[in-house]
Image: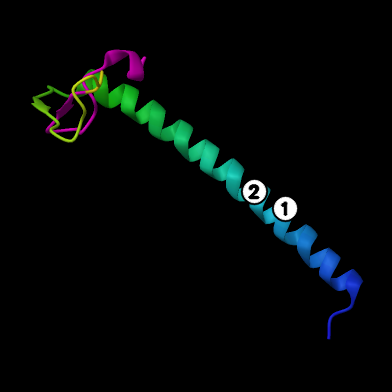
Amino acid sequence: MDNTFDLLELNQKYRMQIIALRNQAINLESAIGENEKKIWKLCKHEWERDITCGQDSLLRSRCSKCMLWNHSFMYQ
């Protein structure tokens, strides 16, 4: 059976893996954002109303080609 020291060491290893994965997720989200900015500029958007949005929602339309929302502020 593992002793206390081994378990503490294992937990520290897990914590370091969690930190690395969080950093990777942050970097990937940033890359997605940069790609969406480029897509916003390149796509010849065809807007369609999104019926799942509420009446008071600012985001009511999505492009049927690139799936971005019709809200340029999000992609600046």
- Callout 2: helix, strand or loop? helix
> Is label 2 in contact with label 1 (beta carbons under 8 Å)?
yes
Q: The residue under label 1 is which amino acid type? A: Met
Q: Position of residue 37 (x, y in %)?
A: 33, 22
In the rendered image, residue 9, in percent from the top left (x then y), is placed at: 84, 65
Residue for point 15% across, 28% down: 63
Residue ID at (52%, 37%)? 27
Residue 20 numbered tag? 2
* Quadrant where the image shows the N terminus: bottom right
Q: Crowding near pointer 2: few (<14 within 10 Å), some, many (20+)? A: few
**How many marks do you count on the picture?**
2
Q: Residue at x 91, y 70 (%)?
A: 5
Q: Amino acid at mark 2?
A: Ala
- Element type where label 1 sits in the image: helix
Quadrant housing residue 39: top left
Tell me: residue 13, above or below residue 47.
Answer: below
Figure check: 44 above or below 16:
above
Q: Residues within 10 Å of mark 1 (few under 14, many from 20)?
A: few
Q: Residue at x 44, y 33 (%)?
A: 31
Task: Check residue 16 in the rendering and tell me which mark sits there, or answer none.
Answer: 1
Q: Which residues are magenta?
A: 60-76
Residue 16 is one of the magenta-drawn residues = no
- Residue 43 location, x and y as percent? 17, 24
- 74 part of magenta stretch: yes
